Image (spheres, rainbow, N blue to C red):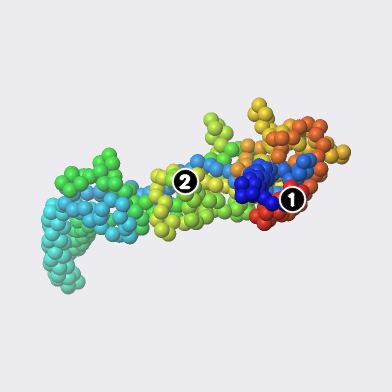
Amino acid sequence: MKMTVNSMRCFSWSRLAFVVAATAVLSSCGGGQGGMKLGDDEFAVMEVKSAASQQSTSYPATIKGIQDVEVRPQVSGFITKLCVDEGSTVKKGQALFQIDPTQYAAAERQASAAVKMAESNLNTVTLNEQQKKNLHDKKIISDFEYQSAVDQLLSAKASLAQAQAQLTSARQNLGFCTVTSPSNGVVGTFPYRIGSLVSPSVAQPLTTVSEIGEMYVYFSMTEKQLLAMTRAGGTLKEQLEKMPAVKLELADGTMYADEGRIDAVSGVIDQTTGSVSMRAVFPNKQLVLRSGGMANVIFPYTMEDIILIPQSATQEIQDKKFVYVLQQDNTLKHTEIQISNLNDGKNYIVTGGLKPGDKIVVEGVQVLKDGQQITPITQEQREAKYHQHLKDQSEGNIATAFK
């Protein structure tokens, strides 16, 4: 039998069209592994089991330094120098501001001169008292005259003590002209600049130094959650020690690198909100956290004896969730379930409608019907058939690709 060129071309194009069509049909059997139906009535099912699940709850929180110390002037005067800039990291005792020391330096010199005068006067009356004592011992002067010399000596000593106290005060005031940091930390804003007149009675502090080597993070927990925690056994202190480490979600949505620990719980429940204030401590070696910032505390916990199912196994109808439960005769029952608000984006926590031992369909649920009979296969079998189909398709085994 002879074939013309045209007939050979027709045969080639027909064969190519068949291969393309077959490939398209194979591809349409499942665009992805999760929803692929591997046969006319074969569907992957899973047995529902109870297990523990790690969950987390987020609480809005406020970040505070271990201590935020207001820096206020202790003397009056004009600011002549800013020794650091806003936001600088400072050490305890480091100079922050300089107040004009002119009048206080003069007062210190005056007090120093007064001390020297008092010391000189004390030397004089001391010698006088000694001479009067010798004369009194020899009965040359009266008791009254000697007692007067003793009183003068006591007065001179008191005058010296007073002058020394004034000198100490003057030197202290002069030292106050250099305003120093009360602790290690980070300097806040400066409401007063060079040339501003300040005094101990100013409304605003010169600045605030926040000690941020460690940071306090404050958040609130409901009374119900607190009761569940404290009823677990032991004192509240013991419960705090047993609590897992907490994490911190920063304002930009990123997670803070270091974990924190809960170290305090308020003893008073807020009557308006029914919540109790809690405090966590986070290390801040890199000074990423700043006092006054906002964040979310991520509190982990474990849920015991829960049923976890993939979201792909569910249908949503009028805000209700349904699954197909496999019956003894391999028919399906369209069953409503209740789920928790908590989920990880892939699975649902089932709170009602299913029990351990039930079997549910986990693929192709959109094409199933209530009462339909299927051939159940395991998820492992589904995986094996899926990969075999891909292999047959890639090798051009069209006949076996549909089996």
Choose top left, top right, bottom left or bottom right for residue 94.
Answer: bottom left
Question: In the rendered image, which residue does mark 2 sit on?
Answer: 253
Viewed as shown, does residue 2 lie left or right of 140?
Answer: right
Mark 2, secondary structure of its residue? loop
Q: Residue at x 71, y 35 (%)?
A: 367
Percent x, y of residue 222: 59, 38
Mark 1, secondary structure of its residue? helix
Question: In the rendered image, which residue does mark 1 sit on?
Answer: 399
Choose top left, top right, bottom left or bottom right for residue 117.
Answer: bottom left
User: Number of labelled discs?
Assistant: 2
Seen from this angle, which residue lies furthest front?
2
Q: Residues within 10 Å of mark 1 (few under 14, many from 20)?
A: few
What is the three-letter code of the residue carrying label 1?
Answer: Ala
Closer to the chain start, of discs 2 and 1, is: 2
Compared with residue 333, is residue 54 higher up or lower down, i.e. above or below? below
Q: Nearer the viewer, residue 35 or 3?
A: 3
Percent x, y of residue 372: 80, 34
Percent x, y of residue 296: 50, 44
Q: Residue at x 32, y 58 (%)?
A: 90
